[in-house]
Image (spheres, rainbow, N blue to C red):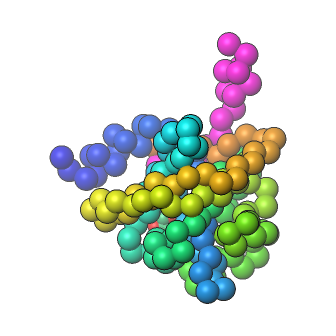
Amino acid sequence: MEPQVFRQVIGHFASGVTVITAREHGTNYGLTASAVSSLTLEPPMLLVCINKNTGTQAAISRTRVFAVNILNEGQADLAYKFAKPQSDKFQGVEFCYGQFGEPLLAGALAHIECRVVTDVEAGTHRVFLAEVDQAKSYVGSPLIYFRGKFGYFDQAERLYES
Ligand SMILES: Cc1cc2nc3c(=O)[nH]c(=O)nc-3n(C[C@H](O)[C@H](O)[C@H](O)COP(=O)(O)O)c2cc1C
């Protein structure tokens, strides 16, 4: 299987967009991620897949805590910003700190604060399986990632009605 073909095909699996954040020794880390999935309800668990070559992955590996910020449809600028290597991605970004010290981005559609239970290495990435400690959602619509592009879920209300 050619990786480029797999990328093109799996891009048909529409997803939301998140920024996964962490904090270690007074430094904030974050990256844009769509490889996020709920895992179990009892206990509440989710998983995230993060490239081993990132500061965020290293910070989570050591601190064992992170937050998932589900982006609002108006936050494509944050999705771009956190997808580019940059020394301080948080400059000019409004956020507060969660209970474990992880940055929680203002205006997100939801904040989920997690503690890592176990992690698995998978090729270029590390999969963190984590228990959810706090989760809060807000009114709004999600930013969508589909076929390599950002978009909006403008069918949402019609879908909810049916
Ligand atoms: C829509 C979108 C989804 C992404 N999903 C993931 C992901 O699930 N896991 C990951 O490791 N990188 C993902 N990336 C890539 C990272 O955001 C990007 O490589 C980031 O710059 C890495 O962080 P760094 O700046 O600390 O190196 C995604 C990028 C975009 C634009």
Q: Residue at x 56, y 43 (%)?
A: 43
162 vs 144: above or below: above
Q: Position of residue 155 (x, y in %)?
A: 67, 27
Vertical side of 153 occupied by 155: above or below: above
**What x and y, as percent, mark residue 149?**
52, 48
Residue 82 in sight from this viewpoint: no
For this view, does 150 lie left or right of residue 160?
A: left
Q: Residue furthest left?
A: 1
127, 76: nearer the viewer: 127
> What residue range appears in magenta?
148-162
Residue 113, picture quadrant: bottom right
Q: Nearer the viewer, residue 92 or 70?
A: 70
The reply to whether residue 40 is visible in this rendering is: yes
Write the residue at 25% across / 53% down. Answer: 3
Q: Residue furthest front?
A: 43
**Residue occupying image coordinates x 34% and y 49%:** 7
Q: Going by the image, does 146 lie left or right of 112?
A: left
Position of residue 153 measured from the top left corner of the image (x, y, whole percent)? 65, 35
Q: Quadrant of residue 69?
A: bottom right
